[in-house]
Amino acid sequence: MSVSEKNSAIEGDQDHQVSVEDHRLLRKVDRRLLPIFTLLYLLSFLDRSNIGNAKIDGMTTDLGISPASYNTALAIYFVGYVIFEVPANIVLKRCNPQVWLPSLTLAWGIVSIGQGLVKNQAGLFGIRFLLGATEAGLFPGVIYVFSVYYLRRERSWRVAIFFGGAALAGAFGGIFAYCIGLMNGVGGRRGWQWIFILEGILTVVISLIAYFIVPTWSHEAKFLSETEKTRLLDRLRADSDAGTDQVFKWSSVRDAFSDHLVWAYAFLFHGFSFVLYSLSLFLPTIIAGLGFQTWQAQLMTVPPNVLASFSIWTTVYFSSKCNVRAPFIIGAAIVSIIGYILLIACTSPGLQYFGVLLAAAGVYTGNSLLLSWPGENVSGQGKRAVAVALQISVGDIGAIAGCLIYRPTLSSHLYRTPNLIAIGYLLFAIVMTTYLWVVMKAENRKRDCLLSKGEAKEETEEERIMLGDRSVRYRYQI
């Protein structure tokens, strides 16, 4: 059977249902990729956000850090993250994920341990920058690896499972922080120090195991038989460029930076990133500000994060079934806005806490959907690697803003003004989602019209791969 015949047969499978053979293949890929990548991201999010738990456990008092300096320490993390995001994915494209991703995990695990050893403000600032720099390559790297193993319509559900690790990290973080905090005084160290040290040691141990589990590129995958690998690459070629082994070209970087849709994805995440990180980093403080004691606040961070996980998986399941993203992203933003309104307008701690639940569910769900979007819609491979990293890099500038803006106010509502700004960022995200939705839908309609009238130029497979998402036969997932 020729390649074109294989592709036709595979496309037929995709139009109706996944064949038994494909189903077995996907389960095998899932078992290899999803558990380890989800675990690594859980650790990544845990190691970046546990500073919120350490804060209410006495860190700022012991180190003599003012509220303003604490916010600066949070922002410095994202400075390192933003600077090294795109370079990290360029290295990944020219390297091997089986070595690169576990090495990053090992590096930030060691840095995380160092957070528990700092003695002053300067040490905290420096270690937070290093943590951001070493964690920068994991998320965009994993999203890119997903793009060379799964069809475009299959990626959002996998990204949702993976991103659910962030929400679970918040849930586990609260429980861990409460338990580890009981070690206060052990070995002459404070409880908040043990939070950083023990969670960092856990990351280091998992990173060493990850060297033997994280897969390499799909065309070299050793965990697949030759027959399975051929089938995987054939179905990827029929769907996009993912089944081809493309050499990195610097022109791909230029293509990504000159595409207005790539920037729109980045600005969309910018809107959601502000609320994602301000909520995850300040959640223990927000809950404590509702009148709960420190130990209660640690444990009460668990329900919002558990709810967020289930919200992610449920919403993305239906999004995948409907094969649409934009309406669900807008819906998630609206749910978050309602949550923030309750947090601002209500005086009852119970209603305010319910607002926190809604905000967390909407924020995490919206992020899980939008972070898979450029991976589904940007082609070829080099351009996609840069686009995914650029989305996170520009997006996390919103996280820097969140860290600097979230300062306690003198009003009866803790963080009233920052919460109002969070609503503004969510409205901005809705605008960007609508822009992407309208533009991509119009472009799909235009290309359908050209093909139906026979006005489209014939393209060889080589030309189609070279053109990527500019090909008249390419369709955006909206």
Image (tube, grey):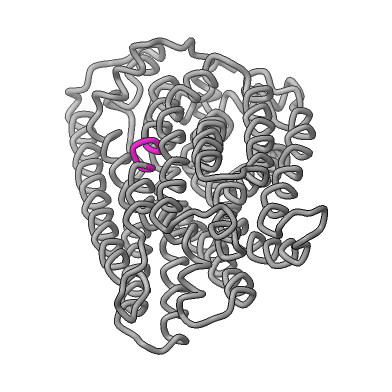
Report if residue 88 lies within the magenta region.
no
Q: Is residue 395 magenta?
A: yes
Residue 47: image x %, image y %?
Answer: 61, 47
Q: Is 194 on the left or on the right of 419, as rendered?
A: right
Position in image of residue 475 (x %, y %):
33, 35
Residues 255 and 316: in front is 255
Left or right: residue 50 versus residue 386 is right
Left or right position of 102 against 279: right
User: The N terminus appears in which quarter of the rendering?
Assistant: top right
- Residue drawn at x 43%, y 44% is 371
Q: How many marks?
A: 0
Q: Quadrant of residue 103?
A: top right
Q: Position of residue 347 (x, y in %)?
A: 36, 87
Depth order, front residue of 60/372:
60
- Residue 398 seen in the current view: yes
Vertically, is 111 above or below 252?
below
Can you see residue 12? no
The residues colored magenta run 391-396
- How far across and how far down the image is residue 391, in percent? 37, 37
Q: Which residue is painted at 30% across and 23% down in the image?
A: 471
Q: Main secondary structure of the magenta part?
A: helix
Q: Residue at x 47, y 38 (%)?
A: 152
Name the quadrant containing residue 217.
top right
